[in-house]
């Protein structure tokens, strides 16, 4: 078995890309502003608390499904996979070993990490084990990648930074940086660096033929296959493309793959119109997108209604002033107060057209003995002029 040529310290600082922290800082500033806005809004705070409870309950059901329906790996259950998992955790300096589960997912080649109630979970689909074996370098890479998410605390950060992650361009860029950092965690722990590329090839080519594909040819697609739509896809995707991920792994031993081809300049404006995060990926990510939009709407709609009501009231007061001025002019010219609207409103009279309240209110006019006029709007109340 070949030796891994990486010489990186197994800490998040060394294995995480510097740009991940840069993106996170920018997103954090925006997210704090959004959360603060929701906190000071009674409606926003209510919906934030409501969706937090719903999210916690749904995540609890996911954890319950894993614990009750999936196979928990231990020294007795799948001992070879357990030994591999413990070894990978030790390489990353993780003394608190997360819970590892194997789940049957209808042939999907996938794995993920999550956290609930202070407990960390790593889940591997059974087809990955069938494709590579429990002690393979490919499984080491996959486990290392998922442990990278836990080691870097990505689960908590995605909740904290949720509003900012929805930002176009910067949101997907942050998520891609997280995934790339976790690929570095996986590449570090694998005993054979080529196993990392074989794992990625299987994700693209399937478990039967993926391991037989040529890694360099696949990585070259990252430079060869370019254009407007690929650039747009790269800028809006929460994951680096598979060909790019393969190229970054090969770049550890072959510098010619350590390049970033230019993106089409016209892709950036369209990417600015594409929501960040994983809003178009379905499932829980879509729910998060809907929740955030709902929270922002809950905060914005009452504010808009308040401004609209104030504006309507100002228009109504201006109407009342015009009516009062017309009544006073009629009284001055005729020596008596008008008996009805027709006395002072109409063609050639003090008020050409009688105004209407924009909120649908009805006006009641009551001339006073001191020369003032009391006008009552059924919507905005009474005022004396």
Image: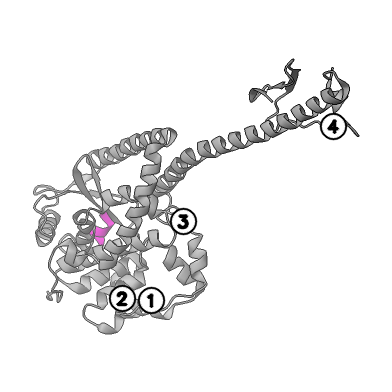
Which secondary structure type mostly characterizes the magenta part of the structure?
helix
Q: Position of residue 222 (x, y in %)?
A: 38, 76
As measured in the structure, the alpha-carbon distance from the residue carrying label 2 to the one carrying label 3 is 27 Å
Q: Secondary structure at mark 4?
A: loop
Mark sitting earlier along the chain (2/3):
2
Mark sitting earlier along the chain (1/4):
1
Answer left or right for 15 relative to 45.
left
Dot in front, 1 or 4: 4
Answer left or right for 186 relative to 348.
left
As measured in the structure, the alpha-carbon distance from the residue carrying label 3 to the one carrying label 1 is 24 Å
Q: Secondary structure at mark 2?
A: helix
Vertical arrangement, residue 197 with respect to residue 32, above or below: below
User: At x 12% / y 50%, what residue is drawn?
Assistant: 97
Residue labelled with disc 3: 275
Residue labelled with disc 4: 350
As measured in the structure, the alpha-carbon distance from the residue carrying label 2 to the one carrying label 1 is 7 Å
Mark sitting earlier along the chain (3/1):
1
Residue labelled with disc 2: 247
């Amino acid at each position: 078995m070949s030796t891994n040529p990486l010489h990186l310290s197994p800490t998040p600082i060394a294995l995480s890309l510097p740009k991940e922290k840069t993106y996170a800082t920018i997103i954090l500033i925006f997210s704090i502003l959004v959360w603060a806005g929701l906190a000071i809004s009674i409606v926003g705070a209510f919906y934030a608390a409501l969706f937090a409870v719903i999210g916690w309950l749904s995540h609890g059901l996911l954890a319950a499904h894993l614990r009750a329906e999936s196979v928990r790996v231990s020294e007795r259950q799948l001992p070879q996979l357990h030994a591999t998992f413990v070894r990978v955790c030790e390489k990353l300096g993780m003394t608190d070993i997360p819970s590892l589960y194997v789940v049957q997912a209808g042939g999907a080649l996938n794995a993920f990490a999550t956290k609930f109630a202070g407990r960390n979970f790593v889940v591997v689909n059974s087809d990955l084990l069938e494709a590579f074996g429990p002690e393979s370098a490919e499984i080491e890479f996959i486990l290392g990648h998922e442990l990278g998410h836990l080691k870097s605390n990505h689960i908590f950060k995605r909740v904290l930074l949720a509003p900012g992650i929805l930002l176009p361009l910067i949101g997907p860029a942050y998520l891609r940086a997280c995934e790339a950092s976790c690929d570095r965690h996986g590449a570090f722990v694998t005993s054979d660096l080529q196993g990392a590329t074989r794992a990625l090839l299987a994700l693209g080519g399937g478990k039967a033929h993926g391991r037989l594909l040529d890694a360099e040819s696949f990585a070259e697609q990252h430079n060869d296959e370019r254009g407007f739509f690929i650039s747009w896809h790269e800028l809006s995707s929460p994951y680096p493309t598979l060909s790019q991920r393969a190229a970054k792994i090969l770049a550890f031993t072959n510098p010619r793959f350590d390049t970033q081809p230019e993106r089409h300049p016209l892709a950036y404006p369209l990417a600015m119109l594409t929501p960040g995060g994983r809003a178009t990926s379905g499932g829980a990510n879509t729910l998060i997108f809907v929740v955030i939009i709902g929270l922002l709407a809950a905060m914005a709609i009452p504010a808009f209604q308040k401004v609209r009501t104030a504006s309507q009231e100002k228009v109504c007061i201006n109407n009342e002033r015009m009516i009062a001025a017309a009544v006073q002019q009629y009284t001055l010219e005729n020596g008596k107060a008008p008996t009805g609207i027709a006395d002072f409103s109409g063609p050639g009279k003090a008020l050409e057209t009688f105004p209407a309240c924009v909120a649908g209110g009805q006006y009641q006019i009551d001339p006073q003995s001191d020369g003032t006029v009391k006008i009552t709007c059924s919507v905005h109340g009474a005022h004396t002029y």
